Image (tube, helix red, strand yellow):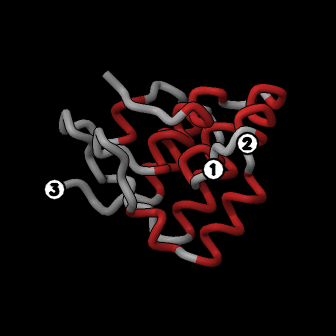
Amino acid sequence: MVHQTPLQAAGPRRALRELLLAHGAEDTPFSLVACGEVERVAEVLRDDPAWTRTTDEVDKTLLFYAAARHDLVSMEHLLEHGAEPQHTNRTGKPVIESTRDAGIRRLLSEHSGPAS
């Protein structure tokens, strides 16, 4: 079971996000990636690049969530700020194995070290 905040679950549904924020929900980098707030994600990473290595309850980083959204722009920001494409989630799966999207796989491959 994946644990998401209500804002993460709201994703890009703007009206629902606004309702949640109006009632005290707080944005996090995870919810910003989930809703596709590319410019705000870039701002957060400029202020604190450590977010690229922060994980959620199932050991997924922001890169996993950007890949799930097919958000190449956020993925590029994350990788430029030190995201680790070879990081594995709780089940031992790296980001590249969690997507079939050729563009995402290519981007991740370009930022991964040589295979061992």
Q: Are marks 3 and 1 in contact (CB under 8 Å)?
A: no
State whether residue 5 is above or below residue 87.
Answer: above
Q: Whole-percent x and y of residue 84?
A: 38, 60
Q: Disc 2 or 3, which lies upstream in sequence?
A: 2
**Labels 3, 1: front one:** 1
Residue 11: quarter of image: top right
On the image, numbered disc 1 is attached to which residue?
Answer: 26
Q: Whole-percent x and y of residue 42?
A: 69, 64
Q: Disc 1 or 2, which lies upstream in sequence?
A: 2
On the image, numbered disc 3 is attached to which residue?
Answer: 116
Q: Element at badge 1?
A: loop
Dividing the image into 4 quarters, which one contains the N terminus?
top left
Mark 2 neighbour class, 10 Å CA radius: few under 14, some 14 to 19, many 20 or more: some
Q: Are marks 1 and 2 in contact (CB under 8 Å)?
A: yes
Mark 3 neighbour class, 10 Å CA radius: few under 14, some 14 to 19, many 20 or more: few
Query: What separation in Å lies between label 2 and label 3 (alpha carbons)?
Result: 45 Å
Residue 48: quarter of image: bottom right
Residue at 36% in and 46% down: 56
Q: Whole-percent x and y of residue 89?
A: 27, 41
Residue at 34% in and 33% down: 97
Q: Disc 3 or 1, which lies upstream in sequence?
A: 1
Residue at 32% in and 62% down: 113
State whether residue 92 is above or below residue 86.
Answer: above
Q: Of the residues shown, which amino acid type is indicated by label 3?
A: Ser
Give 113 or 16, whichever is nearer the viewer: 16
Q: Do the residues labelled 2 and 3 touch (CB within 8 Å)?
A: no
On the image, numbered disc 2 is attached to which residue?
Answer: 21
Relative placement, left or right, of 100 versus 16 is left
**Labels 2, 3: front one:** 2
